Amino acid sequence: MAINRPKGTEDHLPALSPKLTLDVSAQAHGWLVEKARRVLERAGAQRIDTPLFEEADLVKRGVGGSTDIVRKEMFTVYYFGDHGGYILRPEGTAAIVRAYLQNGLKQLPAPLKLWTHGPMFRAERQQRGRLRQFHQVDYEVLGSTDALVDAEAIALMVGVVRELGLTGVRVKLGSIGDPEDRERYNTYLRELFTPQLERLSDDSKDRLTRNPMRILDSKSAGDQELLAELGVRPMLDFLGEEAGAHFRAVQAYLTEWGVEYDIDPSIVRGLDYYRRTAWELHHEGVGAKSALGGGGRYDGLAQELGSKETIPGIGWAFGVERLLLALEAEGMALPEIAGPLLYVAALDEVNVPHAARTAMSARAHARAEFAYRAMKPAAAFRDAERRGAHWVALLGTDEVTQGTLSLKNIRTGEQRSLAAADLATFLQEHA
Ligand code: AMP
């Protein structure tokens, strides 16, 4: 029996793989992360990487006991002789805040901007754009409550989208207020839903006691019908004075910078530690229920994780696979195969080591490959072309004894003869 990869995971494949699509192209993943890196590092974000697994307690406290992630979707890590108390990370924020606290990053100039990229794990039911191992690009800013930081974070997300060349993206912006505001809203929701208890889905009955706001986020059609019927008032109606002023300031900055957004009163981020600004980015090609990414402010998280002082923070995450699906929906082609600049083939078996040596020394300057056995010219050109090479050097005994190279440009047909000693300069000029 052949062994398959686990459900809900993908292999990221090399260029020219049969049936390759953007979302499983290793090259497309790398290309996307590189674009995001450029945008984020230009804004002063520094890379941070945390382990792929963390203490279960970190995930439970950081993500919140009432969330689907903690209640149903955690992958537990067991290994021999261990207590089994580790969880594969479902998101990046809790671990980054843990690392900030544990490594004394508070001593760095604030606000501190960090970014990361890597796999996240949630045991969800697999669907298009919903995987058990998926990838996020993640941006977090620690140490400031300023609305300017919120607005910049949103603008950077839009900046990444623009850098990728995506056009059909909408920003949905909301605020979930301060904890007191949410408490008032939850009281209102409990009063509204308790008489309708029987009509709520089982999950939402549970949410009614744990965190009523999450009913608004329900994926159940019955719940959504009930919500529409009851005409539920939005969280935005319950914002206190400070949270309201903060929300207006974020909008004013975005408007000033020409970053378009729609106010969406239904934005309720699934994670418990969010405060005030919350937003999502959506794209038609990926489906209304599936965000490209989302973010929010989480001033309460550090204390939840055991910090004595409040460390305000805000962050967002893009789903890399979702971005690639959106790009595919907008008709983006697979990235061009980045072939070698130089491909060296020997015409006789005796010169194969020389061809290998030529290619290996060329690697100081450019990507260079060689043929592992002697080839006739036609076969060498065919192989070089399949590999996407630019220049082919054929080595016969004449070339080897005279110390020259006969080069041919596969794309234009141009031919050149070169002293082997000049190869480095030639490669630098053509890189
Ligand atoms: P969240 O951490 O839940 O706010 O998710 C942030 C982003 O990660 C989402 O907007 C998606 O783009 C992506 N994402 C979350 N869960 C999944 C999943 N199971 N499969 C693929 N992408 C996901």
Image: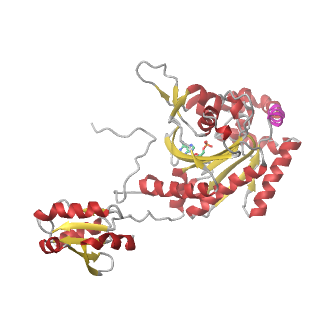
Q: Is residue 25 visible?
A: no
Looking at this rendering, what residue extends furthest in the right direction? Answer: 241
Q: Where is residue 426 in the image (x, y as percent from the top left)?
A: 34, 73
Q: Give the range drawn in magenta.
A: 179-187
- The colour scheme applied to this rendered structure is secondary structure
Instruction: Determine the image quadrant of residue 200.
Output: top right
Above or below, 304 against 289 in this view is above
Quadrant of the rendering where the N terminus is positioned: top left
- Depth check: give the residue in front, 98 or 416: 416
Please tell me which residue is depicted at 36% across the width and 64% down the height of the picture. Answer: 365
Image check: 115 left or right of 359? Answer: right
Q: Is residue 226 visible?
A: yes
Q: Where is residue 308 in the image (x, y as percent from the top left)?
A: 73, 28
Quadrant of the rendering where the C terminus is positioned: bottom left
Q: Position of residue 38 (x, y in %)?
A: 56, 58
Image check: 119 left or right of 186? Answer: left
Q: Position of residue 263 (x, y in %)?
A: 76, 53
Above or below, 348 against 80 in this view is below
Query: Does the segment drawn in magenta span residue 316?
Result: no
